[in-house]
Amino acid sequence: MGCTLNVGAFGPEPYVMKLNTSNDGEHDFIVTGLGLELVILFAIKMNFTVRFLEPLMKSSISTAADVVSMWQAGQIDIMAGSYPHALATLPYADMPVAVFIDTFKYIVPCPRPMTKIQKIMTLFSLATWISMAFVLIFVSFLFWLMSNIPLRKSNFTGFNLLAQCFSTTWAVLFGISVPQIPISLRTRCLFIIYVWYCFAISTVFQAFFTSYLVEPGYEIQLKTLDEVMRAGLFFGSYDLMDLAKTVLPTYEVDEFKYILYDNIEECVRNAMFERNTFTIVETRFASYVASLSGVTDESKVVCYLDDSIITLPLGAVLPKGSPLLDLLNAHIRHCLEGGLLQVYWSKIKHDVQLKADQMDEVGEYVVFNLNHLLPIFIVLLFGNILSVTVLFLELLIKLCESKKGETNGRFRRFILRSKE
């Protein structure tokens, strides 16, 4: 074997992944990850013996200070992982070609699927619902007036009572036949106009109704910090945030209430699934957390605000004046051009999805089944219960009236007998 290459690892998963921590009672770390794969290939190509130092997976300002002190002590030949290539790094490190160009964004809860009942209620605007109710009431009164103020005598009694008029207009709106057809010309003209109106409304309603039963759609996506503020979300802070504030413009979130999490993964999971916080995250890391949770369609749980915060190059760094800089630059360029990093990234996501406790399978097609008809059956059940209730009330009222009539008859007979 060749010379020993002391490799430090800095960053969270998937950039740094610790596989082993001991060998024969002594600490001998075996580390891999997206940020170390190209460095490991470089060491194999150059016949180096890789010696991993303890990985620094908890990122903070104190951890960054530990990295600087290790360099000053000459303990590290190369620091790999997700170290930011920022101006603050230049005084004490040489930066080879960046392995990643990652964008930092605000991750927010994704819009939830709307309930079928909620979507159906918003099928028409409020003004349309009000106008439909107004038309129903107005036409009912017109039928009643035309029947009670006739131009000529008629034996038609279908619209003499206001309740009959409301029942008829309600039946026509739902496409149900009416008990009697008007006989006068003006009433028939009004009736046919109302039938055409109800036909147009019901056709539009049924077309959208079926579509929304199968796929109701989603709520409105959060796009700006003002919308996040109105949604009442908390800002999720984690151990890396102290370090992130040194390079990221985070002043925009100072007015939000904070929730402190133990690590970045817990914070991002909360934003994805608990839906009560938002936070700053690298887009690649958010994708990894989604795969770690068994999500196959990231667009369902990974959503960002429109504006990006900053785009930073990330990768390995070398001590000042390292002779490996040019060799490592050439190696990284060749690997990136060949797509090796993308292949390894796809493999990591696939592996963690297979190991996930629960897979979130999202079908491409939605089959129309009885579950989609549940709202219709609920309305039907409610209507039947209401009809039976009204029937029993009518029977009860009729029974009370008959008993009252019998009582009045007995009382009259008693009075007549008394007079006799």
Image (spheres, grey):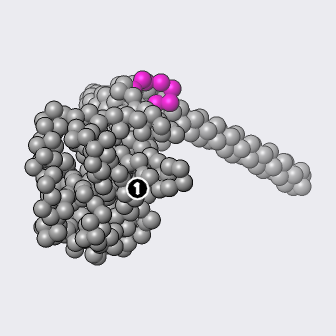
Name the outermost residue toward the bottom.
255
Q: Amino acid at mark 1?
A: Glu
Q: State the image quarter where residue 70 is shown.
A: bottom left
- Left or right: 133, with 88 as reference point: right
Q: Position of residue 304 (x, y in %)?
A: 26, 53
Whether 77 is drawn above or below 177: the answer is below
Q: In this figure, which residue is indicated by the disc labeled 1? A: 265
Percent position of residue 370, x then y: 51, 26
Q: Is residue 223 above or below residue 208?
A: below
Instruction: Inspect this view and state whether residue 150 appears.
Output: no
Looking at the image, which residue is at 43% across and 58% down?
266
Q: Nearer the viewer, residue 203 or 405?
A: 203
Residue 82 lies within the magenta run: no
Residue range in magenta is 366-372
Q: How many marks?
A: 1
| Residue drawn 25% across the image and 40% down it | 47
